[in-house]
Image: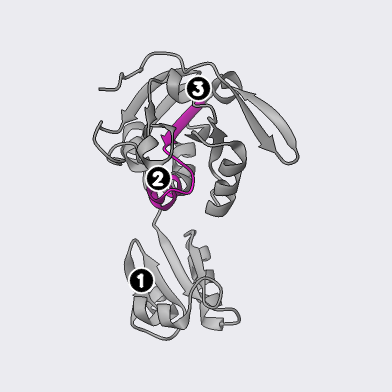
Amino acid sequence: MFANKEGQPVPQVTFPTRQGDEWVHVTTDEIFANKTVIVFALPGAFTPTCSSTHLPRYNELAEVFKASGVDEIVCMSVNDTFVMNAWLADQEAGNIRVIPDGNGEFAQGMGLLVDKSELGFGKRSWRYSMLVKNGIIEKMFIEPQKPGDPFEVSDADTMLSYIAPSANKPDSVSIISKPGCPFCAKAKQALIDASIRYEEVILGTDATSVSLKAITGRSTVPQVFINGKHIGGSEELDIYLAK
């Protein structure tokens, strides 16, 4: 079993990071001193669970965490700084700070550096999350020591339930649209007026009309989804919001 380090200080590590065209050395103290920080660590950038769920959900809930007293959300992985920066840009996760634990020093200090040589990964971090206050670990959620890459307890919703169990979570909203569509503009404005953040999928850029029909059974835009439920077009959205 991995050791739980609640009540202990985080490891002292200096991380070489690339910021613009400059090398900047970031210390553990710079990350954690006099701050409340969430850390979630994962096996690797660009890997499936990390890219589809782990990082996006922390990014999505960032404002709720901030309102609950969290100063920063940090993602750590045993990758170099160029890979981490490219992954962050690809994910468009502007609410997350990525830290490259390239040599695995932080993961080793946490007792969570594992051998994934069978996958060609070498040494990587086990998946976990933790809440750190002024450099001291208050709470840890370590994934169970099972074969593969379990993802059961280090997710953003579990962390939020610990920090602020009664916090209201934002709706997950997506709108499929196309440029120049007046009904799409109307639907997007309705969401903005209702203070609802949304992700836009643009036909011709992010998807095709074939995908639109396959997903929604319709050939017109916009098509709106809220929390996984298909709401429909702009008129149906107005009815939904009126409720």
Q: Secondary structure at mark 3?
A: helix
User: Given the image, on which type of amino acid does mark 3 rest?
Assistant: Glu
> Taking the image as drawn, is residue 172 in sight?
yes
> Taking the image as drawn, is residue 241 in sight?
no
x, y percentage for residue 232? Answer: 37, 77
Residue stretch in magenta: 36-56
Assess whether residue 243 is covered by the magenta stretch: no
Badge 3 is on which residue? 105
Would residue 191 be found to the left or right of residue 225 on screen?
right
Badge 1 is on which residue? 240
x, y percentage for residue 224? Answer: 41, 72
Please say if 165 is above or below 110: below
Q: Residues within 10 Å of mark 2 (few under 14, many from 20)?
A: many
Would residue 194 be found to the left or right of residue 18 on screen?
left
Front label number (2 vs 3) = 3
Assess whether residue 38 is covered by the magenta stretch: yes
Q: CA distance from mark 1 to mark 2?
A: 29 Å
